[in-house]
Amino acid sequence: MLQGLSITISVFLMTLIISIPLGIFITFFRLSKNQLISRLAKTYILIIRGTPLLLQLIFIFFGLPLLGIVFDRYTAAIIAFSLNYAAYFAEIFRGGINTIDKGQYEGALVLGFSKFDMYKK
């Protein structure tokens, strides 16, 4: 039981460490003014959120070896969970950014904040 618990906790921690930053990047790609980048991010989110996690796990562990890309069970689980949760985090972050009032952006620009500083603070 303890060995299973340690593996579960390590999968959880690795998923968080990978998926949150990846979700932030996907959010900014989704909010990009470049239509190609925005649509690619939107399509990624649509596909990943629209398919079950178990199907994604099966595809990564059993489907990718047909293309010559082989992962062990632990790595396949980390990849599948990270990609899945990154899509969910991206939508959470996008929703949070979209709720910021336009006046807050204007106020930050008047104060001389860069776009990076606006999102950071």
Image: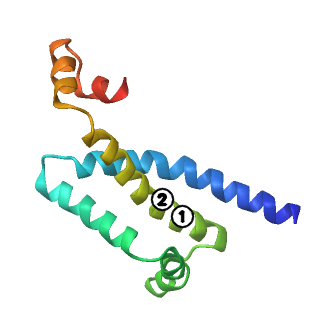
Image coordinates of residue 45 in percent, x first then y, are: 33, 63
Q: For mark 2, what is the residue?
A: 85
The residue sitting at 18% across, 61% down in the picture is: 39
Which of these two is toward me, 75 or 40? 40
| Residue 37: image tag | none
- Residue drawn at x 20%, y 11% as measured from the top left: 111
Considering depth in this image, is 29 or 110 the residue closer to the camera? 110
- Secondary structure, mark 2, is helix
Q: Which residue is drawn at 23% across and 22% down?
A: 114
Q: Name the residue under label 1.
A: 81
Q: Count neighbours of disc 2 (C-alpha within 10 A) and say few if under 14, some if 14 to 19, many if 20 or more.
A: many
Q: How far apart are marks 1 and 2 (CA)?
A: 6 Å
- Seen as rendered, the residue at the extreme bottom is 66
Which quadrant of the figure contains the N terminus? bottom right
Q: Are marks 1 and 2 in contact (CB under 8 Å)?
A: yes
Q: Which amino acid does label 1 sit on?
A: Phe
State which quadrant residue 77 falls in: bottom right
Q: In the rendered structure, which amino acid carries the disc numbered 2?
A: Tyr
Q: Is residue 121 left or right of residue 7?
A: left
Badge 1 local density, few (<14 within 10 Å), some, or many (20+)?
A: many
